[in-house]
Amino acid sequence: MSARGKILDTIGALQNSLTKTEKKIASAILSQPELLGQCSLSEVAQELDVGEATFIRFCRTLGFKGYTDFKLDLAIELATQERETSALLDTDVAESDTPKEIAVKLQLALSNVINETINLLDYHELENVVQELRKAQRIFLFGVGSSGITAEDAKHKLMRIGLQTDAVTNNHFMYMQAALLRKGDVVIGISHSGHSEETINALRIARENNAITVAITHNLRSPITQEADYVLINGNRQGYMQGDSIGTKMTQLFVLDLIYTLLVKAEPEKAIQQKQKTLDVILDQRK
């Protein structure tokens, strides 16, 4: 989890599940990451008004042995990143911005949340999910609100390559479908916050009925991850008002498109045949 190049992204993904004191440390590091490079453990603890032992526990939560390892790897990350954080800070839309300037700012924000997702994804976990989907009898995508729209989009793509897929976005239907699942079925629950009660409950019911469960969320250790056999983390911790919704949507779609691409890569001839078959039947209806 603490691999070089993604420390800040991991802190962002963990932030909502931290204790009050840990959140204080996380917020300080995210807003001023260069602070650690200038301070000893005692100095940074005093600066943040937390105990040294508390800060060390925070480092260990991220997978480091202690403060020195954490400080060194964070310094390397800050030295090698290509000013992505600075670019993000420029995405606030000013009243004087032209439509093109706003478009460029939005492009920078979207590029950054995709990079964040690439940093946060566990690729071994991703490969396991793809293997489960390849052998699944049926696939269901659960999500409400905006995540439900994402589920519908993924359903369309997976159906096109011949997978028995459905998207369920109403909580009552989700519960009923989850109750009817069986071994060999796979459910993907989508919730950016990881706190969607409807999706969490549906995954729990699905799991009780021996289905494989997958969570796509931004927040590590959020409630939805407790009901998932596999967890895939997407980016977008910044939460800017004008970019948050589309940023979240893009990162969810990116993860699902990555899954789709890996499925096609695993069996390209079958995928092409199934896509052609589904295209032909649609074209036939237009004659």
Image: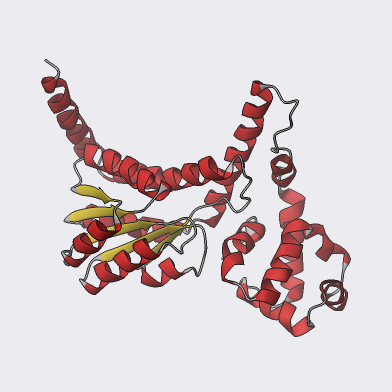
Q: Where is residue 187 in the image (x, y as percent from the top left)?
A: 28, 59
Residue plotted at (21% across, 36% down)? 269
Rendered location of residue 192, percent (x, y): 47, 55
Q: Is residue 157 left or right of residue 218?
A: left
- Residue 52 falls in which quadrant of the image? bottom right
Q: Report the front residue among 5 and 13.
A: 13
Q: Which of 118 and 252 is in front in this view?
A: 252
In which quadrant is the N terminus drawn? bottom right
Q: Residue 204 lies in what quarter of the image?
A: bottom left
Residue 169 x %, y %: 30, 51
In the image, is 21 to the left or to the right of 51?
A: left
Residue found at the very far top of the displayed protein: 287
Residue at image point 11% right, 21% down: 284
Residue at figure coordinates x 74%, y 77% from the top left? 55
Q: In which quarter of the image is residue 130?
A: bottom left
> Is residue 92 among the parts visible in the rendering?
yes
User: At which x and y percent is residue 234?
Assistant: 50, 53
Which residue appears at 20% of the width and 71% of the height?
A: 209
